[in-house]
């Protein structure tokens, strides 16, 4: 039952995110006088709708997106310049004609294509901006009130041997493996490190920095075990290990691979606890989340290729792989039904973070500068504005709206690409899913 509740919560969260995204387009469009015949959440057959004023509001059967229909999306075109023949030209012209037919007599000024460039940008950026705001509010609210998982100076794990940084998660020690310095020094999970080489330890970040700087030099360690304060000595080994930034985030290169550097290594991990963070740090953490989401979008083709290999071949599914709505629903169900003694508040925070991550992904994905995505319309508006400025400087007067109907072939290709991507992720999430808890 809890699993289904989690799925239902994320389903409602997705619908609300889509609905608010479309409101981000609807409100400024109406404010600027554009006629909006339809506001719909979902695609396909209409399940429920009502009409208020000149706009029909409703919900459709397939909750994979939404739209607002703006009158006059495509300019009529310039017959003196557009003399092309053939099926493609006919297709583009038919789109122009259909757009023109929606414009009521005497309301040509209410067509979207007649808006100024700044107003077009506001309308088209409004949807992604709403998703960005939702993500920001949820992330910062949870970070500052409920907190985030943060490492402590108490040990959560102690390795028995040294494994390469690139070793898989299930790698085990071999007979000829090098013993880990932490285990050799007698440290155990639950020990709290209080001093390292004479330095008072106040955070795990400070401790890891001191270990990295120690090289292969023998140092004294003071730690608390139960009610006893004990000391020992350890000699870190110099190994190629991952680099982390000031926010504790893994540093990766342009290909998405983690960056390694020679530094001291002990073979021990921190016990992680959830703690609230200050507002300024929360905003910085949000910036890191936004940056990582952007990096995922940039590498999306390669990640989708990896998903396809895992779905149709023998390759393992990367735990950090992209997922579709089925995968997101599975995550929500697992979070809601996990039997770990977690409080309701922690489960609710985890589900809220999932909704926040989804909104961040919607923002970044929609900013791809290709139609029919919002980023494609934004790019077209910017091109139109730049063209007008150049024409003004050259004394050519008003060049009129850009003929965006010519981009329809690109939009249809992108539509099939996006449909294929969605079907691939649904299939992969069913046959080779990612599980949060094993």
Image (cartoon, rainbow, N blue to C red):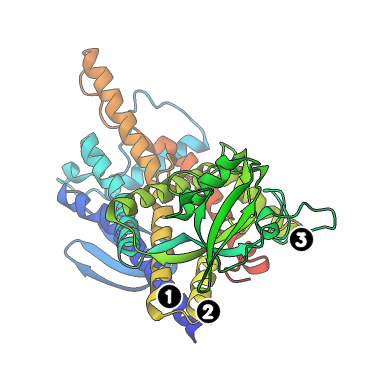
- Disc 3 is placed on an element classified as loop
Q: Tell us which disc is closer to us: 3 or 2.
A: 3
- Tag of residue 347: 1
Q: Is residue 40 visible?
A: no
Q: Are marks 3 and 2 in contact (CB under 8 Å)?
A: no
Decide which of 386, 105 is in the foreground and name it: 386
- Pointer 3 residue: 172
Could you classify mark 3 by the number of other residues whose Cα lies within 10 Å: few (under 14), some (14-19), or many (20 or more)?
A: few
* Residue 243 seen in render: yes
- The structure residue drawn at horizontal position 52% and vertical position 45%, both measured from the top left corner, is 210
Q: Position of residue 203 (x, y in %)?
A: 44, 55
Image spot of residue 64 (x, y percent)? 45, 63
What secondary structure is found at the residue carrying circle 1?
A: helix
Above or below, 149 against 365 in this view is below
Q: Which residue matches tag 2?
A: 338
Q: Is residue 370 left or right of residue 423?
A: left
Q: Pointers 1 and 2 in contact (CB under 8 A)?
A: yes
Along the viewing direction, whichever of 51 and 10 lies nearer the viewer: 10
Residue that appears at 75% across and 55% down: 179
> Which structural element holds mark 2?
loop
Q: Residue at position x 43%, y 75% from top? A: 347
């Amino acid at each position: 039952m809890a699993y289904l509740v989690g799925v239902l919560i994320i389903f409602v969260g997705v619908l609300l995110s889509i609905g608010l995204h479309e409101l981000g387009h609807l409100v400024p469009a109406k404010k600027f006088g554009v006629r909006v015949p339809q506001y719909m959440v979902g695609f396909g057959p209409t399940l429920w709708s009502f009409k208020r004023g000149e706009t029909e509001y409703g919900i459709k059967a397939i909750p994979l997106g939404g739209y607002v229909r703006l009158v006059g999306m495509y300019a009529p075109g310039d017959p003196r310049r557009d003399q092309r023949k053939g099926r493609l030209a006919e297709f583009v012209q038919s789109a122009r004609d259909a757009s023109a037919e929606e414009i009521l007599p005497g309301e040509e000024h209410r067509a979207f294509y007649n808006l100024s460039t700044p107003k077009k940008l506001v309308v088209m950026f409004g949807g992604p901006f709403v998703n960005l705001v939702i993500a920001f509010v949820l992330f910062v609210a949870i970070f500052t009130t409920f907190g985030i998982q943060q490492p402590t100076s108490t040990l959560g794990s102690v390795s028995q041997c040294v494994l390469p940084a690139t070793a898989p998660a299930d790698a085990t020690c071999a007979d000829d493996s090098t013993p880990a310095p932490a285990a050799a020094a007698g440290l155990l999970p639950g020990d709290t490190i209080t001093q390292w080489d004479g330095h008072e330890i106040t955070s795990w970040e400070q401790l890891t920095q001191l270990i990295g700087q120690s090289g292969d030099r023998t140092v004294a360690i003071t730690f608390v075990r139960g009610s006893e304060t004990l000391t020992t000595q350890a000699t870190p080994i110099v190994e190629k290990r991952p680099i982390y930034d000031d926010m504790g985030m893994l540093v990766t290169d342009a290909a998405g691979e983690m960056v390694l550097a020679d530094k001291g290594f002990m073979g021990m991990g921190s016990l992680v606890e959830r703690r609230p963070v200050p507002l300024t740090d929360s905003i910085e953490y949000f910036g890191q989340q936004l940056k990582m989401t952007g990096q995922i979008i940039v590498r999306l083709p390669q990640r989708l290729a990896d998903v396809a290999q895992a779905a149709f071949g023998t390759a393992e599914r990367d735990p950090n792989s992209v997922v579709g709505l089925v995968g997101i629903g599975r995550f929500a169900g697992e979070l809601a039904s996990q039997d770990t003694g977690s409080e309701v508040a922690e489960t609710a925070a985890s589900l809220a973070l999932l909704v926040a991550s989804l909104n961040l992904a919607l923002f970044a994905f929609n900013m791809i500068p290709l139609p029919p995505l919002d980023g494609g319309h934004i790019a077209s508006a910017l091109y139109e504005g730049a063209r007008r400025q150049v024409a003004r400087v050259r004394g050519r007067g008003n060049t009129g709206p850009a003929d965006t109907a010519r981009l329809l072939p690109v939009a249809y290709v992108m539509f099939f690409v996006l449909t294929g991507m969605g079907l691939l992720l649904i299939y992969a999430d069913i046959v080779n899913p990612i599980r949060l808890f094993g």
